Image (tube, helix red, strand yellow):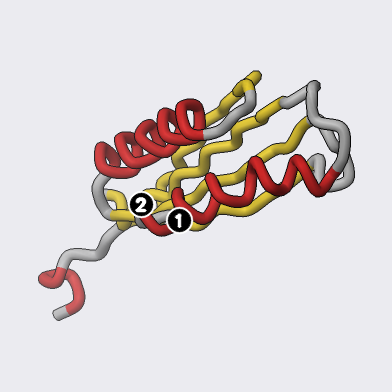
Amino acid sequence: MALGYVGVLTIRVEMPWVGNLKEKRALVRPVVERLKSRFPLTVARLDGLDAHDWEVLGVATISNDYGWVEETLKMAADYIAKEGPYRVTSEQVEITVLGEAEDAEDEE
């Protein structure tokens, strides 16, 4: 039996109409902050930090329930897609199994 699961969502957002980094940050940062406050997630801006028209966000969560990890990442992806004034051009979900749980009986 698995000890737990780590889920990671990588999502690319594009906004070709944006002309500078300050404008892009003003679009992306509020969505990232609201996402972190609404869901039990860690969110990071991973790539495209110096590009004005795209960015890659990483979202991660951990639990002992595979279904919960999967559903939480799905809700995060849906939230990102509907909350920001940008286009989601790609998303990828990876869920990794963490070790094997030891039974309490085995420790005795």
Tell me the distance, in whole angstroms, between the alpha carbons under discs 1 and 2. Answer: 6 Å
Element type at mark 1: helix
Kindly identify the residue that appears in the image at 79 percent across and 22 percent down.
Answer: 16
Residue extending farthest left: 105
| Disc assigned to residue 17 | none
Q: Residues within 10 Å of mark 2 (few under 14, many from 20)?
A: few
Give above or below for 8 relative to 41. Answer: above
Q: Position of residue 45 (x, y in %)?
A: 68, 50
Element type at mark 2: loop
The C terminus - image quarter: bottom left
In this rendered view, identify the residue nearer to me: 36 or 82. Answer: 82
Q: Position of residue 38 (x, y in %)?
A: 35, 52
Kindly identify the residue that appears in the image at 48 percent across and 34 percent down.
Answer: 83
Residue extending farthest bottom: 108
Q: Residues within 10 Å of mark 1 (few under 14, many from 20)?
A: some
Q: Position of residue 1 (x, y in %)?
A: 25, 49
* Direction from residue 42 to residue 100 in the image, left or right: left
Instruction: Evaluate if marks 1 and 2 touch, with contact meaning CB atoms under 8 Å apart.
Output: yes
Kindly identify the residue that appears in the image at 17 percent across and 70 percent down.
Answer: 106
**Residue that mark 2 sits on:** 39
| Disc assigned to residue 36 | 1
What amino acid is at disc 2?
A: Phe
Q: Position of residue 52 (x, y in %)?
A: 85, 37
* Direction from residue 38 to residue 7 in the image, left or right: right
Give above or below for 76 relative to 25. Answer: above
What amino acid is at disc 1?
A: Lys
